[in-house]
Image (spheres, rainbow, N blue to C red):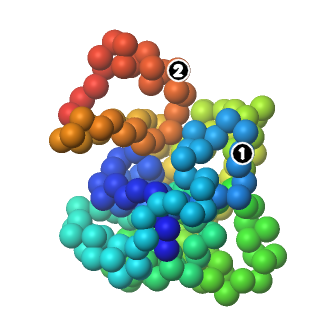
């Protein structure tokens, strides 16, 4: 499967400490998308599910679950379902984002999509709509996006208490990466005011 990047431990992509996989490839091309570099279906790094599971095993005792983002995870549902089933077998929760609605996914009658839905605890669905931008809820950027609870592993109460945040990483070669969700203007203000803490 095509992967854009992996962050093995983050607190900015759902409740608790999470192993996050950004897949490469998206057909939605939402206006105002923050992740246009994940759109190209032909770039990214090739991984097998087993290679990702090997990375996941290294941090298993430190994480609460995995989060699947993108890109569009359900374009690679077969492979991601293998990873998600492994995570669930180790009592870890699975959050999956999709630009498709839950109804659109189920209407596909696709075995891989259905398999990934079966091992997803929380689906965050719907395209990002710039005209409906709203950061008042955790992890979503527009009013239309929904939280679809597919198990009781993650509760609405847990999600209501979760606060949006950003994480900034600086690699040894000086490259800076940012992940998380929230108002980008507030992030810019934080950069100007040097309001960071080491994690």
Q: Residue 101 placed where, x, y %?
A: 75, 61
- In three-dimensional space, the C-alpha distance between marks 2 and 1, rounded to whole angstroms, equals 20 Å
Circle 1 Cα neighbour tier, 10 Å, few/some/many (<14 / 14–19 / ≥20) = some
Is residue 169 visible to the viewer in this orientation of the structure? yes
Q: Quadrant of residue 7?
A: bottom left
Q: Is residue 167 above or below residue 81?
A: above
Of label 2 and label 1, which has the lower sequence position? 1
Q: Residue 159 placed where, x, y %?
A: 51, 50
Residue at (34, 12) in percent of width and height: 193
Nearest the viewer among 182 and 158 is 182
Give the structural element (helix, strand or loop) at label 2: helix
Circle 2/circle 1 CB separation < 8 Å: no
Left or right position of 33 against 91: right
Give the structural element (helix, strand or loop) at label 1: loop
Q: Residue 42 placed where, x, y %?
A: 57, 63
Q: Which residue is mark 1?
A: 30
Q: Is residue 14 above or below residue 32?
A: below
Q: Quadrant of residue 34?
A: top right
Q: Residue furthest bottom?
A: 111
Q: Quadrant of residue 149?
A: bottom right
Residue at (54, 28) in percent of width and height: 183
Left or right position of 12 against 185: left
Q: Is residue 33 above or below residue 154?
A: above
Q: Which residue is mark 2?
A: 185
């Amino acid at each position: 499967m095509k992967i854009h990047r992996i962050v093995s431990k983050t607190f900015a992509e759902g409740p608790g400490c999470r192993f996050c996989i950004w897949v490469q490839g998206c057909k939605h091309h939402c206006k105002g998308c923050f992740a246009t570099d994940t759109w190209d279906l032909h770039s990214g790094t090739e991984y097998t599910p087993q290679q990702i599971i090997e990375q996941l095993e290294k941090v298993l005792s430190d994480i609460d679950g995995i989060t699947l983002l993108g890109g569009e995870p359900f374009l690679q549902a077969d492979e991601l379902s293998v990873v998600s089933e492994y995570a669930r077998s180790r009592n870890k929760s699975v959050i999956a984002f999709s630009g498709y609605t839950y109804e659109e996914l189920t209407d596909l009658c696709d075995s891989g999509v259905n398999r990934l839905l079966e091992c997803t605890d929380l689906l965050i669905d719907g395209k990002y709509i710039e005209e409906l931008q709203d950061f008042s809820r955790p992890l979503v950027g527009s009013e239309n996006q929904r939280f679809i609870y597919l198990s009781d592993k993650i509760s609405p109460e847990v999600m209501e208490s979760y606060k949006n945040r950003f994480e900034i990483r600086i690699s040894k070669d000086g490259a800076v990466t940012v992940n998380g969700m929230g108002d980008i203007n507030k992030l810019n203000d934080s950069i100007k005011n040097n309001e960071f803490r080491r994690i």
